[in-house]
Amino acid sequence: MRGTEAPRKPLNRARVVAAAVALADDEGIDAVSMRGLAEDLGVVPMALYKHVADKEDLLDGMVDALIAEMPATPPLPPRQWQEGLRVMLLGARSVVISHAWARRVIETRTSRTPAVLDHMERVTQIFLRAGFSADLTHHVMHLLGNRIWGFSPELFNESAGSADRKPGKGGTPDPANYPGILAITADAQTRRPGAGCDEDFEFAFGLDTIIDGIARRRRAGWTSTKPKEKP
Amino acid sequence: MRGTEAPRKPLNRARVVAAAVALADDEGIDAVSMRGLAEDLGVVPMALYKHVADKEDLLDGMVDALIAEMPATPPLPPRQWQEGLRVMLLGARSVVISHAWARRVIETRTSRTPAVLDHMERVTQIFLRAGFSADLTHHVMHLLGNRIWGFSPELFNESAGSADRKPGKGGTPDPANYPGILAITADAQTRRPGAGCDEDFEFAFGLDTIIDGIARRRRAGWTSTKPKEKP
DNA sequence: ACCTGAACACCGTTCAAGT
DNA sequence: ACCTGAACACCGTTCAAGT
């Protein structure tokens, strides 16, 4: 399987990024090294640097590919901003949860590519078109945070406590030390026996609670008082 | 400065972790490699593995050290849960913002150490003592997400768009393509000329909006209907 | 009990050269 | 214009050995 391939098509940025996405999907994000990706493409590592500036640029490209996958949300009347926001963010979520690497990569991005700005612009416009002030819209965007990508951090994953640290002092933590956490996880077990947390439910709950809070702020004519003018 | 030191005190986990924290504070988290840390301690890299299981365990230890720094919050009457929560999370925030590496390291943790569970327990108890159901408390914890550590993701950092990617197609993005983002950043400039986003303000705004939403859910007797019993 | 030396199997990226 | 070879300066971690 090596040396018998047809002459390769020349690489380009899109092919490199697509291969990185496929590699991350198949073998996890840790498999996406410049060297591993190059081997996947049948090319020497340095060849990639003609198409991406560096590894950060490659990861930025992967996020751009994610955004390109997100469903175009049909425009709703501005009045229905709550439903419009929900549809858009659940659409983003459907893409993000289909790529196991997506959350972590998004969280580590420090630059804002045009595609990222496009997505942020679309979310922003939902509020502005609905008549939100620029001021409130600004702070609402901060409040949404990574929810604009359709995810929120996982607070309880796997069981409480971790596997088997060796030199660390403790083994499995004693649930008796965490009666509150025990109470809420026990309650959850009552409702969905044998299952972990339902992340879709958590996302919707959080989003809806935030939407309610936003709607109230807006109705109340919320404004960030200019610090300079506060005596 | 090498070979002339007094005979070293034996290492232990606490000294290793403290050195990692100091190194991250001084030179950034990227300087915290097993090799770099070992050199800092005047020891060969392998010596560290007697005190931490691996690098993940070292990073877990750094988060534990962070938690140990958090101010003990004086107990308030359960009725004042909103103020109690605010004080606790702003206390956590004061520590997290004092270590530039803290956000990123917290975001990458996958195990829950006893210290992490302790902190989660403390937050959980604020709700339970105030009479929240275990059910609502559970989902509220998910909603708070990393806000229990006193931070939320940075949506707009630096200016919009990034520095100078080379092979990527665009240079600086044209603000005309992002009229909504332009509108909200222009509005922000009006209010705080020359300044970036006030993260403390964003954190408080988001937290207070969420607290309001939570309080309303509770007053409404919110419950997650058990899926099994919904006809 | 605690630390060391040498090695293994990797990284991202540069430089100068090839076609 | 696009790709290659060799090298540089790193990683985390193992194994067997030293004191």
Image: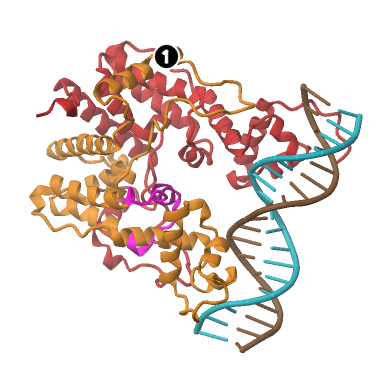
Chain colours: A orange, B red, C brown, D cyan
Which residue is disc 1 drawn over? B74
> Which residue is more in the foreground, A167 or A6?
A6
Residue at the image position 26 percent from the left and 26 percent from the top: A192
Residue A176 point in image, percent of width and height: 44, 12
Q: Residues within 10 Å of mark 1 (few under 14, many from 20)?
A: few
Q: Is residue D19 left or right of residue A10?
A: right
Q: Which kind of residue does numbered mark 1 sit on?
A: Pro
Q: Residue A179: x percent and y percent?
A: 39, 14
- Tell me if residue B136 comes above or below residue B202 in the rendering: above
Which residue shows up at 39% across the image and 53% down it? B194
Give the residues in magenta: A96-116
Q: Nearer the viewer, residue B7 or A218?
A: B7
Is residue B222 among what the camera can see? yes
The quadrant holding residue B93 is top left
Q: Chain of mark 1?
A: B
In the image, is residue A101 part of the stretch drawn in magenta?
yes
In the picture, the quarter occupied by the N terminus of chain A is bottom right
The residue lying at 42 percent from left, 16 percent from top is A178
For residue B91, which quarter of the picture?
A: top left
From the viewer's perspective, is residue B180 above or below residue B207?
below
How far across and how far down the image is residue B167, in percent? Answer: 47, 72
Where residue A43 sits: x, y (%)? Answer: 55, 72
User: In which quadrant will I find the C terminus of chain A?
Assistant: top left
Give the SS element for disc 1: loop
Magenta residue check for A73 = no
Number of numbered discs on residues: 1
